[in-house]
Amino acid sequence: MRRPRLSLFLFTFFILFSFIHPSVSAQGFAGKVKEFTLANGLRFFVYERPQVPTFAGMIMVKVGSVDERKGETGLAHFFEHMAFKGTSVMGTRDYAKEKPILEEMDRIGDDLAAEYLKGDRTDQARMKALRDQLTKLQQETLTFAVKDELDKIYSENGGEFLNASTGNDSTQYFVMLPSNRLELWFLIESERFKDLVFREFYSERDVIAEERRMSLDNTPDGLLRDEFTNIAYVLHPYRHTVVGYMEDIQSYTKAKAVNFFKTFYIPNNMVAAVVGDVKLEEVKRLAEKYFGDIPRGADPPRPTEIEPAQRGERQVTTRFDAEPRFLMGYHMPGPADKDNLTLSLASMILSRGSSSRLYRDLVTNRKIAISVFASASAARYPALFMIMGQPRHPNTAQDLEKAVLEHLDRLKKEPVTRAEIDKSINQAEAALYRSIGFADNVFLAMRLLRNVIIFDDIDADWKRVEALKKITPEEIMSAANACFTETNRTVGILLRKEKAGEK
Amino acid sequence: MRPDRNRWLVLAVVAITLASFAFSPSAVRAQKDPNTLKFADLEFKAQKPGMAAVKKGVTFYFKEDHEQPVINGTIIIKTGSLYEPADRVGLAPLAMRMLKAGGTKTLTPDALEEKLDFLGSTIGSFAGLEYSEISLWTLSKNFDETWKVLLDILYNPAFDKERFDTEKKKDLESIRRRFDYPTSLGGTLYTELIYGRDFPEARRTTSATINAITLDDIKAFYEKDVRDREIIVEFTGDFKQAQALALLKKDFKDWKGNPPAKLDLPKAALAAKPGLYLIDKPDMTQAVIIMGHLGLNNLDSDNVEVGIFNFILGTGSFNSRLMREVRSNRGLAYMTFGSIGLGRDKGLFSNVCMTKSQSVGEAIKLMKDITEDMTKNPVTAEELEVAKKYEVNAFVHKFDSAQAVVSQAVYLKLDGYPDNYLETYLPRIKKVDASKVLAIGKRAVSPDSLVILVVGKKAEVIDQLKALGMGDVIELPLPKE
């Protein structure tokens, strides 16, 4: 996430949205969306929607925080920021003169990172001297800079919603433009990946440090979520947040970032969507012209860690100057497993709509909480079934936990009713249409590409709704019994500092 | 073997690329330079929704769109929190929520929720200051049933007592949680500093005002300020306008559509003494900074032109001075923006940034200099051009959904904008020059009257604030609610 308008939370919302509420059965995207693949493996999806003379363009790269190694957390997100800094042509008046200064900065940056990594033996005076040198050189580069030119060109051309976001599983770049600017989109998007110059590398670390402070360290929900995932996983890279640890952010080197880019930003690891007032043939022609010459790369390495089965409940309590919050998670199977969709159905029965079990009982009737929400994951790798809520004073997070556990037990012991399943299916079908408005071309592009990245099927969300119809109450009970066990549970609670005795 | 083949491929491409560079560097450069692509400005005419008078006090705005089988409907009621008694702050939103939450004379609250969820439809409501809404979203096949529920809510609310208790308790809990986020603490208190606590835009609920509200208050508000009040009905999506109009004529036959009472409202005046204010939050590693004063009225003679001023100051993302200087050039913040806001009486002029405790002083000085410069020196030709081109070419996005077309037109009308506002928008933008931007700065921004609020860790920021030489730092207590 590069601009403040959207947050990482929005992306999280997206993931939930697309998979808790898959799409309507009779329809689907397949008839409306045309696909073609360039020789280098880059796949394009084109949805012609001519009602308004605009389009949304999106490139999604199958790289997210899950692809980062220890000591390099946040690199996918950091790279996303770098991708706005221009090329050897865009963003500079004289790259030939700028280049040696950038290289000099990298040498100092490497020294700085090495010094920082000495931990408690870091020489602070040397750190400061190196930082001062970087600042001075950064000022020198500004004499050649055309600041934020990518933004400027898109803005002058009526670009709206220009942004990018990074998640656990993917990174996406998007903008909405007047439809006569299709070629502009192709030129800029191809150049930023063909000829990227890593400018402002070191000052951007400071920006990202501020982003982390804003979204995680100084907000109750961000802080709790960070601490929670850190213990919910012991091995799998889903354990670290997208923005990365502050310590890693401070010690990225240019070499690491370039290597990361070369490994993952290859056409056979990217998908693109163009949604709006465009013509397939024109998109094809321009795709070939601008993206056709990027060489295919070697298949990127993928995480080598498989999360070990959890064998005991884990708990974390963190403190912030805010009212209590509660998070609970259970490891659940990924989309390849039948129980994945079954648990998704269970999450809808638990908390979708004000007539759902958790909302009706805990918020409306017993008034233990003012919000409670359950969600099942459907991601590249097996992730968590999550329940989150805000207890209502004087009820505590523990009261809420107890009440939620009663509901999970009920799912394990009693079959749900047919009416509850039917209601969830109706809600899921309706939700398939919620992100299809004109202004939602960006969201539609996101939905299509995410279906491809996770399920390799643009109609995955529609098909998953169709598949809900075959799930039986007994299957829900059996999946609940397998998933909602004490030893598979992680609980995170946030409390106010001065109430240290309370839980 | 495969990696080798790829390596050869890469080498081949590199060789070809180098060859073409050697052959004609300027041609290659041109291919890589987006500035070489020239496009005509998009000539897009403002879209208008359909409009029909259903009867006196009931107006219908609509735009059909049959691409998807969904319908959006909204009833805008000319009521809101301006009509609440001062000791019942929170009454209007609570009453609007209770319309649905409290069930109807034929549907218990549980049955109502069950029915909507089963249809996959949603009905929502909220209260604004002057206007409130009840809206529905439904698949078109379920429109009839969803609409019936909405009418039932509007005509026959039952105000269930137990649900009233639940909704009040939710409000009380939300008050406890209001300041959980430093940004919401900053925003709330900044608004209060500028307008004064009792001004409509700054009033907020407390446990006392919520506790004071009775079910009879809710019923009385409904009878007096919702029922039979003047309304605007909006439909967008998969419906037929003639049928919809006939439906509204039938369903609102007896709705009286009374105009709201004229209110005698105070005029906005800067409430706080200009200067530095601090709220101590010892746990924070990053401070929230908000600075500014009162903004302009919705119908100000420069209400379009101010968009250019704002773009250059702080809404134009990386093209704005705040983003460029505070974030891009100095890495002091991730989030920073600013604008002269328009409002019912007067909006807020505000500039916002979040920065680590150690750089609070530097950020404030920078933001203040940027603001001040906008009142002293003309913006550059390049800044002006980018802002104007953006407005011209992005104009189409204001109309990129049927809902946007309808709700934009309705609210412009409600807020008193002239009927040709959107038609004159671009001609006005095209006329803006640097002297106009400077004139707006001189008239609407007063660097000597800035109220600067910092929410952050006192121990780490206080010396920086004192060093700014802007007088005493006034420490505000952290409000309980």
Image (spheres, helix red, strand yellow):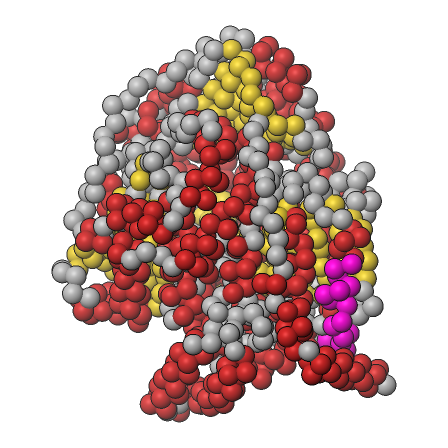
Image quarter where the N terminus of chain B lies is: bottom right
In the displayed structure image, the side of residue A201 where residue B223 appears, left or right: left
- In the rendered view, would you say B252 is above or below A53? above
Viewer-nearest residue: A219 or A296: A296
Q: Is residue A295 shown in magenta?
A: yes
Regarding residue A231, the answer to whether it shows in the image is no
Q: Image quarter for residue B447?
A: bottom left
Looking at the image, the residue that sits furthest to the top is B254
Regarding residue A139, the answer to whether it shows in the image is yes
- In the rendered view, would you say B253 is above or below A2? above
Q: Image quarter for residue A41?
A: bottom right
Q: Image quarter for residue A416?
A: top right
Q: Residue at x 18, y 69 (%)?
A: B467
Which contiguous range is marked in magenta?
A285-300
Image quarter where the C terminus of chain B lies is: top left
Q: Is residue A372 shown in magenta?
A: no
Q: Residue at x 76, y 71 (%)?
A: A293
In the displayed structure image, the side of residue B293 where residue A56 appears, left or right: right
- In the rendered view, would you say A499 is above or below B111? below
Viewer-nearest residue: A263 or A221: A263
Q: Residue at x 73, y 83 (%)?
A: B19
Image x and y of residue B280, in percent: 25, 60
Q: Residue at x 33, y 50 (%)?
A: B435
Image x and y of residue B423, in percent: 50, 33
Looking at the image, the residue that sits furthest to the right is B1
Viewer-nearest residue: A132 or B287: A132
